[in-house]
Amino acid sequence: MLKRKIYDDLCIWKDKEKKKALVVEGARQVGKTFIVEAFARENYENIVFINFVKSPRMAQAFSGELDVDNILTQLSVLIPDSRFVPGSTIIILDEVQLCPNAITALKFFSLDGRFDVIATGSLLGMNYKEIASFPVGYIERLEMHSLDLEEFFLANKIKPDVIKTLRVNFEKKKPVPEAIHERLMELFREYIVVGGMPAAVSEYIETHHFGNVRKIQKDIVSDYLYDIAKYADGAEKTKARECFLSIPNQLSRDYKKFRYATVDKHGSARKYAGSLMWLLDADIISFCNNLERIELPLEGNVISDAFKVYMRDTGLLVSMLDEGAVADILSGQLGIYKGAIYENIIADIFTKAGKKLYYYEYRSNIEMDFIIRFAGEATAVEVKSADHTKSKSMKALIDNYGVKQGVKLSSKNVGYINNVTTYPLYMAMFL
């Protein structure tokens, strides 16, 4: 089984003396159901599992009064072999977004307290108008992503002790032994291609066949397009699909600010902004907002109509390119698109670490890939796809715009000069 960090979070939740119902959210196929079922099997005597996609009739148990005893009575009829023993039973409500009343019922399960309840799902297909009362204050949330870089390293037999040592090197700004550095850079490039979708990672670990991985990824992209057609409302179906398919083209340009005209020549925010939000809510994309000025708090300086769009899983982005892109990435020969791919993977790493994404652009003179809060300072982060790390923009921000420190992420080992630290790209996971 792939090691997933969220398993430890589930254990922490289970050990709480007074716990609320837990909602595990995330995009399709990131492994929510798998990890919750594995957690349940290893920690509970009795498991009551309900999948509202496979068994839509289970919604009947939540169609009347939402009293817990009433729900349990109906579930015991619908699932004859179910056992509800207080203190040793977990109830799993999978794809809960398809049963609005089950979402409301989470409040009453939390108040009742006899049974642990985990709901899994995404915002796909959720209609808030159909939810009688959203259980605000009565649920805990965990957001699940596809595998992050550290989880990918662990899956590829990089030992936890090695990652701990890397963190020490990061904190002390100490170079990594060259053999380890070269191996981790190799794995980093493989992570760009494979991404973090569990099915793709498992296939890669088992076969190391990029063709097989690509087929899985393209199937997932097709599933996303199917979800758009199934769940997006009315006219949003076509527009959300067009926005999604435009992302590789958006990122292929030197000027990567999202342009509605790239979606269609008559595109505008009025026409497409809602479709982009739909993709954001479905955890398919991330926004990276431009900043008016580089000052903390960063959120207070956002230019709302200037942003980049990145794919949540870089492997899926690569699968949307031509077949030769995989070999180009692994060999480091990708031309202008290489910078876009490397920006996307760092955006992916930051997003999975819970960071909001910001960048800075001033006219056409200065552009900084990311601005983050790091070590208590607004920090400029520049992503380099090669060893060359000189940057006029970084120097200008430090010399003239009040930025006190910078980070350059590249294939080079750790180094430091003039308030700028160079880290290997894989150390982005420690930022």
Image (cartoon, rainbow, N blue to C red):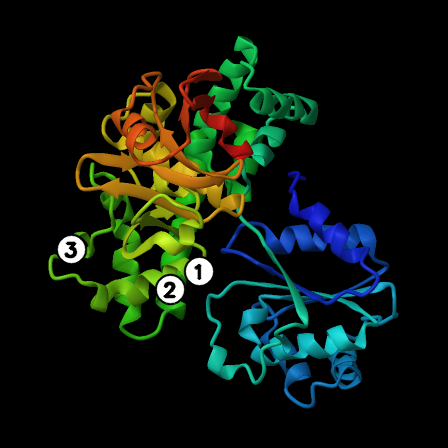
Q: Amino acid at mark 3?
A: Ala
Q: Which residue is mark 2?
A: 278
- Measure the alpha-carbon separation of dots 2 and 1: 6 Å
| Camera-nearest residue between 259 and 390 | 390
Asked which secondary structure carries label 1, the reply is loop
| Total tally of numbered discs in the picture | 3
- Measure the alpha-carbon separation of dots 3 and 1: 23 Å
Q: Which residue is mark 3?
A: 261
| Camera-nearest residue between 368 and 396 | 396
Residue 5 placement (x, y as % from top left): 65, 43
Q: Residue at x 59, y 27 (%)?
A: 156
Asked which secondary structure carries label 2, the reply is helix
Q: Residue at x 68, y 82 (%)?
A: 61
Q: Is residue 248 above or below residue 133?
A: above
Residues tagged 2 and 1 counted as in contact (Cβ below 8 A): yes
Q: Which residue is mark 1?
A: 282
Q: Quadrant of residue 248?
A: top left
User: Crowdedness of circle 1 by 10 Å Cα count: few (<14), some, many (20+)?
Assistant: many
